[in-house]
Image: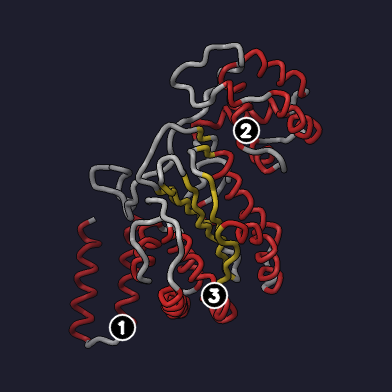
Amino acid sequence: MPLHYGSAPAWLFSRMRALAQGIILLMSEEFGPDEFISKMSDPVWFQAFGCLLGFDWHSSGLTTTVCGAVKEALNGIGEDTGIYAAGGKGGTSRRAPAEIERKASEEGLDVERLIYASRMSAKVDSSAVQDGYQIYHHMFFFTKRGKWAVVQQGMNTLNGMARRYHWLSERIDDFTCEPHAAVCCDSRGEILNMVARESREAQVTCASISCEKPEKVVRQLENIKTLVMPERHQIYSGDINPERLESILLKTYERQPENFEILLGMKGVGPKTIRALALVSELVYEEPVSRRDPARFSFAHGGKDGYPYPVDRKTYDSSIEFLEKAVRQTHVGRTEKLDALKRLRNFDHLL
């Protein structure tokens, strides 16, 4: 999405908040709060939702404004719907843990688990996926049953674009292996992707390196700085300052992280530390890291030719069932209702 600055006018935002509140109330009543959370993790649905609320369909502001309108809408109906929101844009995003704790405690939920999910999703997209987009917006949605979703966005001032990251709790088995529900951006490139499946061995190596004595790792980095880096390499020796990294490496050495997720979650371990460890992993231990960009074009159900992936029949059937239920609940005549259901069922037969 093009990176746009500014904010929605008050007259529009107040209406967006009111309409969002009505839609959330309707969806939570008809389909339950978990369904709304799932929809927020769907980039196609989210974009359509923003259009429905009347915001610019193709700008970075859609993400931040829609999330802001939803959060304010939930402030008045959270108790009724069982849906809560925490975080936001800029400095507001840093209040997410406190906001999660307050609402989750009231519902008797596992506060630490939810706060960990919020922090790790942000850490992955700021440090483990180094794609040139700086995270500046983080919104965490959760229900009284503990289901959660994240919508966060990063900006790249060089290309003037924004990139949106979607997460959904039920899709995550491992925070460090293909954890995203979707990553959306029109601009793709070669990046450092430490949560790609093909980076698994490099993760193990990085965690192992972080447990070594700092002076050994610093010595390896100093040696690397004298090498001529290949043009394809996304990690440059000039980006690495061994002396500054030594204090962080001392912390990892003392902590002895058991795996990459624990390493990534440590305070002070940021993009530069991960880049340095990835560099040592690849050039010293010959464990390559992935440069596959996780961003993709948004397809709801896949494509018949297998691009960007084969048709997901389970998701497709779920969408049809969702629509069928919606049609049943509408106040239309019996004949019109049966005709509508028949048309939907025909789509199912085509699969």
Q: Are marks 1 and 2 in contact (CB under 8 Å)?
A: no
Earlier sequence position, callout 3 versus callout 1: 3
Question: Is disc 1 placed on a helix, strand or loop?
Answer: loop
Above-or-below relation of 205 to 189? above
Looking at the image, residue 273 sits to the left or right of residue 330; the answer is right
Residue 331 in sight from this viewpoint: yes
Looking at the image, residue 98 sits to the left or right of residue 151; the answer is right
- Residue 138 image point, x, y percent: 56, 56
Task: Provide the residue designation for mark 1.
Answer: 330
Task: Give the camera-side residue of 101 and 275.
Answer: 275
| Front of the two marks 3 and 2 | 2
| Dot 3 amino acid type | Leu
The part of the image, by quadrant, that contains residue 43 is bottom left
Earlier sequence position, callout 1 versus callout 2: 2
Looking at the image, residue 265 sits to the left or right of residue 348; the answer is right
Q: Residue at x 49, y 48 (%)?
A: 154
The part of the image, by quadrant, that contains residue 211 is top right
| Dot 1 amino acid type | Thr
Number of numbered markers: 3
Q: CA distance from mark 3 to mark 2?
A: 37 Å
- Residue 290 image point, x, y percent: 48, 30
| Dot 2 amino acid type | Lys
Above-or-below relation of 175 to 194? below
Q: Are marks 3 and 2 in contact (CB under 8 Å)?
A: no
Q: CA distance from mark 1 to mark 2?
A: 54 Å
Question: Is disc 3 placed on a helix, strand or loop?
Answer: helix
Q: Residue at x 47, y 16 (%)?
A: 230
